[in-house]
Image (spheres, rainbow, N blue to C red):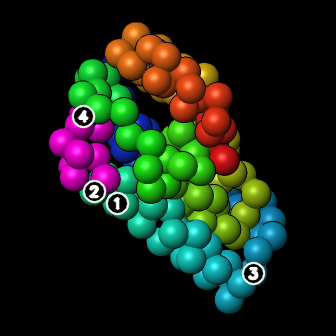
Amino acid sequence: MKNMIPPHLFLFCIIAMVGIRNLFVIKIIIPEPLNYSGLVLMITGIMMTIKVRKEFEQVETEIHTFKNPGKLVTNGLFRISRNPIYLGFTISLIGVWILLGTMLPMIGCVLFILIANYYYIPFEEKIMENTFGNEYQAYKSKVRRWI
């Protein structure tokens, strides 16, 4: 699974959601033009991930899931979530789901959340604990995993 980094999973989920929407339109639950409100969530989530990426670049630390970080980032969006990138991706996927307007594409959102919460995040937390020890434990005790 180390070949599937979170941005690739995010894109896979979008493609799967669109494919599901095009193959299995059971019932439209969010009609036009209400479904366009999903664009706001998509943009919000993408802006969150861009902001976090810039924070990582500013402090010159590693953003890649499977590489060791050089610094513990606790400012910016990390003050409200230990995982603002995953949160941003999830918000964007919810936006895609709303934009698609049917129930089944929600599978992509659920898939992303499950893999992030039970694979990526625990993997990263172990690295953070090994790298930053008590400093990370103190941060972890103050800031929730998602929000």
Location of mark 2 (residue): 54
Seen in the image, is 14 located left or right of residue 80? left
Give the mark nearer the N terminus: 4 vs 3.
Answer: 3
Give the mark nearer the N terminus: 4 vs 2.
Answer: 2
- Of residues 48 and 13, the one drawn nearer to the viewer in this rendering: 48
Count of marks overlaid on the render: 4
Q: Are marks 1 and 2 in contact (CB under 8 Å)?
A: yes
Give the mark nearer the N terminus: 3 vs 1.
Answer: 3
> Is disc 4 surrounded by few (<14), some (14 to 19) or many (20+) residues within 10 Å?
some
What is the spatial separation of the Cα atoms under label 2 and label 3, in whole angstroms? 36 Å
State the quadrant of the N terminus. top left
Image quadrant assignment for residue 91: bottom right
Asked if residue 135 is among those painted magenta in the image, a careful observer would answer no
Seen in the image, is 86 located left or right of residue 98? left
Numbered circle sitting on residue 62? 4
Please tell me whether mark 3 sits on a helix, a strand or a loop.
loop
Name the amino acid, label 2: Lys
> Is disc 1 surrounded by few (<14), some (14 to 19) or many (20+) residues within 10 Å?
some
Numbered circle sitting on residue 91? none
What is the spatial separation of the Cα atoms under label 4 and label 2, in whole angstroms? 11 Å
Location of mark 1 (residue): 50
